[in-house]
Image (cartoon, rainbow, N blue to C red):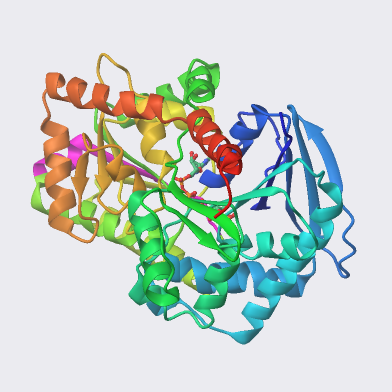
Amino acid sequence: MSRLVVVSNRVSVPKGRGAAGAQGGLAVALGSALRESRGVWFGWSGEETDHFTGDMNMQRNDGVTTATIDLEPQDVEEYYNGYANRTLWPLFHSRIDLAEYKTDFGRGYERVNERFAETLFPLTEVDDLIWVHDYHLFPLGERLRRRGAKNRIGFFLHIPWPPRNLFVSLPYHERLVRTVLEYDLIGFQDEESLENFELYCQKELGLEIGEDHCLDYEGRHVCLRAFPIGIDFDEFMEGGKSKQAKEAERRIRESSRGRSVIIGVDRLDYSKGLPERFDAVGRFFDTYPERVTKTLYVQIAPPSRQDVVSYQRIRETLEQKAGQINGAQSEVDLVPIRYVNRGYARRELFGFYRASRIGLVTPLRDGMNLVAKEYVAAQDPEDPGVLVLSQFAGAASQLPSALIVNPHSEESICEALVQAQDMPLEERKQRWSELMESVRANDVEFWRKSFVEALVGDAAQPKG
Ligand code: ADP
Ligand code: F6P
């Protein structure tokens, strides 16, 4: 069996499975996937250095070897804060109004991808399978090939691939896609992203793609597929039995004093639809004043990417909105919204989810959204809660038994909240068992296996 070398911008050096933090779905999923194989995980340490040396910090933890490098402050500014999070992230989440196209960002992005390639290449062995993750590292495969890598190299995109008419606004869009086509296997979260990418290749590059979603590109056979990511089901359920999970559940149940709890758990990111969600909850309280004393909305939102202005703004906006709604709706002994800017251990999240009648997940765009799946997994089978889910999350196509809403419509969210609060036990159980089946079957292990098998399997196919 070949060794798996995983590469991503962020590497989560394990601090123990219960560790708190706002790592995001990628780190959570990869940590789980790597524990299953004797893999190496390579990426940025999250630290800065005055001069890039390429020195690696290697650690072995929990069966996973991590190898990380430090980057220079200019790299972090142009590559991570810049091209990744001020250009690609907004564009790929259809927020073209926030996307900034700056030459320095593009240069920094190329430079850091080159630095990754330069450091990673000597670490690889000829029969390693290399699996590159996410929008920070589109050009890495091409950079490795230039250095002579003949390995099977796969790429998985954790965020949506945007529609063609938006994507073409990116300067040098063609160059970016041509670098992506240097991978042997390109994975997307869902069929929509796959279609968007294929349509671009066909219309803009004139490429022919077969019914098997493969194409011949510059003498190589490249395959495109959707591999919806999942949660580490077994680990998450195991954590749910812990003291920490039970204590967290008790905290919410006791302090909510019989109110019906709505929970949201998201990184503080404009793609998560938080201002729109707050407005909808405000409208719900205005429209149904009799429900104010019977409802508690808990929103957990740890800060993310705080060096980027759009992320600072959203934080201010939410503080204002939470303050306004609480100001208007609170009593001396009752506050309807608890807005918390910190991370929690995943076991605690399990307890919070379990104590909540409604899981409110309303991103405006999301590659998948693992929180939706975690909420489902944490429910009590005898008295499960209801998942309210945005139609624009990748998870929506996998979880059609949720109450699917339009996150831009306050009415749509309000109606779903009422329906969820009033839903009879039998219907809750029915919907939940359908959701649970999908969450269990499509877990992170299935995702990893499907991707790796396709990466290996496609190698067996004759070229051209
Ligand atoms: P994204 O990758 O965009 O952040 P996902 O919903 O796919 O979104 O993944 C988020 C992951 O981060 C989930 O596994 C979730 O449990 C975790 N997470 C989100 N918020 C917190 C928090 N406050 N504390 C701890 N973990 C969190
Ligand atoms: O899952 C999408 C993603 O962008 C990951 O690539 C990333 O690690 C995560 O969200 C959290 O973002 P960041 O690494 O910028 O804190």
Verify whether residue 299 appears in magenta.
yes
**What is the magenta range?**
290-304
Give the farthest residue toward the bottom: 103
Q: Quadrant of residue 74?
A: bottom right
Q: Is residue 39 visible?
A: yes
Verify whether residue 310 appears in magenta.
no
The spot of residue 190 in percent (x, y) is 37, 49
The spot of residue 267 in percent (x, y) is 48, 52
Query: Split into 4 quadrants, where in the image is the N terminus?
Result: top right
Q: Is 116 placed above or below 244 here?
A: below
> Looking at the image, which residue is at 55% across and 46% down?
26
> Looking at the image, which residue is at 74% across and 73% down?
111
> Looking at the image, which residue is at 72% across and 48% down?
151
Figure label count: 0
Q: Nearer the viewer, residue 206 or 101?
A: 206
Q: Is 361 placed above or below 253 here?
A: below
Q: Is residue 335 visible?
A: no
Side of 391 relative to 440 (left or right):
left
The spot of residue 220 in percent (x, y) is 60, 58
> Looking at the image, which residue is at 42% across and 41% down?
228
The spot of residue 293 in percent (x, y) is 19, 38
Q: Is 67 placed above or below 205 here?
A: above
Q: Nearer the viewer, residue 244 or 228?
A: 228
Q: Quadrant of residue 464?
A: bottom right
Q: Nearer the viewer, residue 147 or 119?
A: 147
Q: Quadrant of residue 416?
A: top left
Q: Nearer the viewer, residue 3 or 455?
A: 455
